[in-house]
Amino acid sequence: MVAAPWPGVDAAWSRFVQVPSTAGVDPAGTVHKWHVLDNAGELAAAGLAPVGTLLCVHGNPTWSYLWRSLLAGAAAASGGPWRVVAVDQLDMGFSARTGTFRRLADRVTDLSDLSAALGLKGPVVTVGHDWGGLISLGWALAHPGLLAGVVLTNTAVHPAGFSLPPSLRLALHPAVHRWGTTTSAAFLRVTHALAQPALAPAVRDAFMAPYRTARRRAGVGNFVADIPATEEHPSWPALAAVSEGIRALAVPALLMWGPKDPVFSDRYLRDLVERLPHADVHRFEGASHLLPEDRDIATPAFDWLAAHVLASDGGLTAGRAAAPSGAAAGPAGYTPMLAELDARTGDDSVAVVDMAPAGGASSGADRSLSWAGLAARVDDLAAGLASIGVSAGDRVSLLVPPGIELTTLIYACLRLGAVIVVADAGLGTAGLSRAVKGAGPGYLVGIDRALAGARLYNWPGVKISAGAPAGRTGLATHRAGLATHRALGVAATVPELLEKGRRLRHTGTAAVFAAAAPDADAAVLFTSGSTGPAKGVVYTHRQLAAMRDTLRATYNLKAGSALVAGFAPFALLGPALGATSVTPDMDVTAPRTLTAAALADAAAAVGATTVFASPAALDNVLATAAMLTGGQRQALAAVELVLSAGAPIPEPLLARVQDLLPQAGVHTPYGMTEALPVTDIDLPGIRAAGTGNGVCVGTAVAGATVAIAPLGADGVPGNTPETTPGATGEILVSAPHVKDRYDRLWITQAQSASIPGWHRTGDVGHLDAAGRLWVEGRLGHVLATAEGVRTPVAAEHAAATVGAVARAAVVGVGPAGAQVAVAVVETAPPAAKAGPAPAEVSAAVRAAVAERTGLELAAVVTIPRLPTDIRHNSKVDRTALAAWAARLLSGARAGKP
């Protein structure tokens, strides 16, 4: 044991090992003294036999201390116990200073020497960080008989063409290298400063402990100097051997990543995913380079080991939801999303209409394509995209507003078997940037504003402009447009690709596209971000088709019907349904821009029978209905079905919608990006259900099954699906159209699929005696009071019955188990600033909530506007609101929620 103790380290783990060296850099007979943290003695003392060994390799300039959380959790790990051997590489940590310059190949050999001296037996799982990841992979390739899996955190392997991160290029510069890495402790301090959040002083001191003097930092400098920046570098052959060799690794792999890492950014993760396509990935949003310090990696790592390494089948199918016993079957068979389009290549009737963008110069005009025209355009664009290298499995980010261009792009990608990546501009710049970088597309198609964002924020992918170079008239403006595209790094434009594809098809030289496999990835669709950072949701071709079939079966959406797509998620489904579709004159990412006139004009353009619109959009339609002309009212009177999804809608608002569209059945399906729709209810059904604890969202749609995982006394849901009437718990869904998985969020996916065959929605609710589902809120919004667990929605509805209240949110303030309920309300007219509600409003809200739910409010406060998500403009961010209310009520500066 080294004399000094370190926070989080059991003294019994620390030991030294004498290891004979076979590295070519050492003379024959050399023996090195290694320091390791090893829990073998702890396990033996407890009478525990390990199920395997984790061989953990740090990078530069850390040491084995980085892996203390794995050592601490190994004995009681799920599926364990595991032996953990965390090494200090030679010239690093508390291992020997050898006085020799050790290159990559030497370090791989060194690790093999150590494992031999320790007598490691399989199964062994390597765990690596930073350049320790590369070294651990070298060991993995050299010991296939022992290897059972690999775990990597923020590391890199590179072939020819690799370029160093700027920080490492600086560290290699002759003017900086020795002073920055060896003479001073600057390299260590800079590395430690990357932690998010900052390291505690005692932890920072522990990381610095082995490197107090320049002599002890020689290995840090040598490590940096051995980075193979060019093919001429002596360590390049070893680097290339590892980076290419791992393509053949067939063992389970887990990649855990901190996306804020300025050293090993997401581009290095994408490179690893390309080399290890079977790897499970989890990106920890907000985490940086020192991921094991920033986040708990031990719990998910051990869960993954139990599911994937210890599972009898290697765990390669773990986390995918199979249909539960007794679940309703979905619509039979599989029909590709392109089937309707392919069947109507000779049909000259209208397929899609694009109303002019809101506020545009040509507002009021429209563009349209026939089914034959759309089919030809899709095939032309598919051929054009293929000509620049887009192929099956490639991810293509589509940053284009809903309309003809987006429709063409979506179906061209489906034709190719490429995977569409769709994220709303409504996520905001930061949210959109996280989404695009997280998905890692190989191609990015966007309007100029999106391409400018891609340039500014370094979004990945070959850049394709959705339009021709900008310019109103004349050669000068055209040249200016070309210059803009060059500045934005545009490699091609959609008009160019359409023309090229048309020529290729005309000459018979276009590529022939095989039908996509039903279970191949088809789309990555991002959630709204209303419950945290937006998550990518992966759908296969079969699951997208099942979504289409569910909508068709539930709402009788036959081929030949006509729909207004005023809700972005439905903009892609019209052609697949065989329905004529129109995008109204609005900004689909800002629902409140839909006016009654725009809705009526869109309906009139196609003789619409169906309208899709979000609750916020319908709210503005009602607010502007007084300006409708007689003809516009007639167009709305012909609508037979209104669907509004995304958030609960009060019955009075639906009644007003019914008055505006008197012949329509008004439905409010419940669902989410991960499964849409799940249940359905219409206005008469809402009235029949009456009031209750939550919002009644009806019964399961065609092919879906709904169940409840009841909440315990601590507010945590169980793991057994139930359909007992009145039992409140987490809502579970099983259906053919449930998502395949969360994208590069292995932990989130494992949690959501922890009950085999079911998707855990994170919503809370109950079933009534008639089998109807009532939604009571989100798991994260449950109030853990001294009197027990309470859900917020019924109390919010009660508060909203007070005449002065426009909207309300009820949140818990204080520690779990002793939280008090606080109502935060928007008033009509809005309050000028946040603060305690007027006495009469407070009294009325308290009385209404107590009468309906029995919940006693600790406070009622007003706010000018509740914080909501951008996509729906109606989902309240109660987590942010609870923190804000706590600050306000404590007398602190509350700021904005």
Image (cartoon, rainbow, N blue to C red):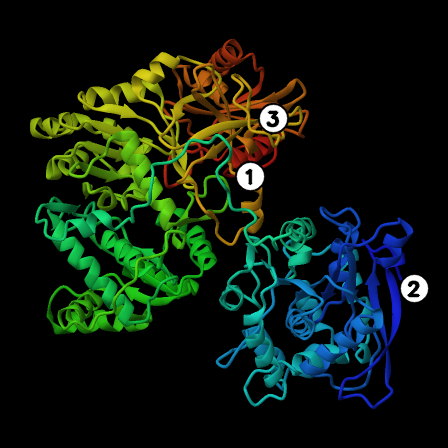
Residue at numbered disc 1: 756
Residue under the image location 49 percent in, 67 percent down: 274
Q: Compared to 401, does 874 lie above or below? A: above
Horizontal side, residue 298 vs residue 97: left or right: left
Residues at discs 1 and 3 in contact (Cβ within 8 Å): no
Across and down, in percent, residue 419 comes to: 37, 57
Residue under the image location 48 percent in, 35 percent down: 877
Give the mark nearest the N terminus, 1 or 3. Answer: 3
Category of crowding for the residue at label 3, using alpha-carbon neighbours closer than 10 angstroms: few (below 14), some (14–19), many (at least 20): some
Question: Callout 2: helix, strand or loop?
Answer: loop
Across and down, in percent, residue 295 comes to: 65, 52
Which quarter of the picture shows residue 450?
bottom left
Residue at numbered disc 2: 3
Q: Nearer the viewer, mark 2 or mark 1?
A: 1
Question: Callout 3: helix, strand or loop?
Answer: loop
Q: Quadrant of the N terminus?
A: bottom right
Q: Nearer the viewer, mark 2 or mark 3?
A: 3
Q: Compared to 306, does 630 lie above or below? A: above
Q: Which mark is residue 251?
A: none
Q: CA distance from mark 2 to mark 3?
A: 49 Å
Q: CA distance from mark 1 to mark 3?
A: 18 Å
Residue under the image location 55 percent in, 32 percent down: 779
Residues at discs 2 and 3 in contact (Cβ within 8 Å): no
Instruction: Name the residue nearer the viewer: 403 or 617.
Output: 403
Residue type at numbered disc 3: Leu
Residue type at numbered disc 2: Ala
Residue at numbered disc 3: 711
Instruction: Name the residue nearer the viewer: 444 or 61.
Output: 444
Q: Compared to 139, does 431 lie above or below? A: above
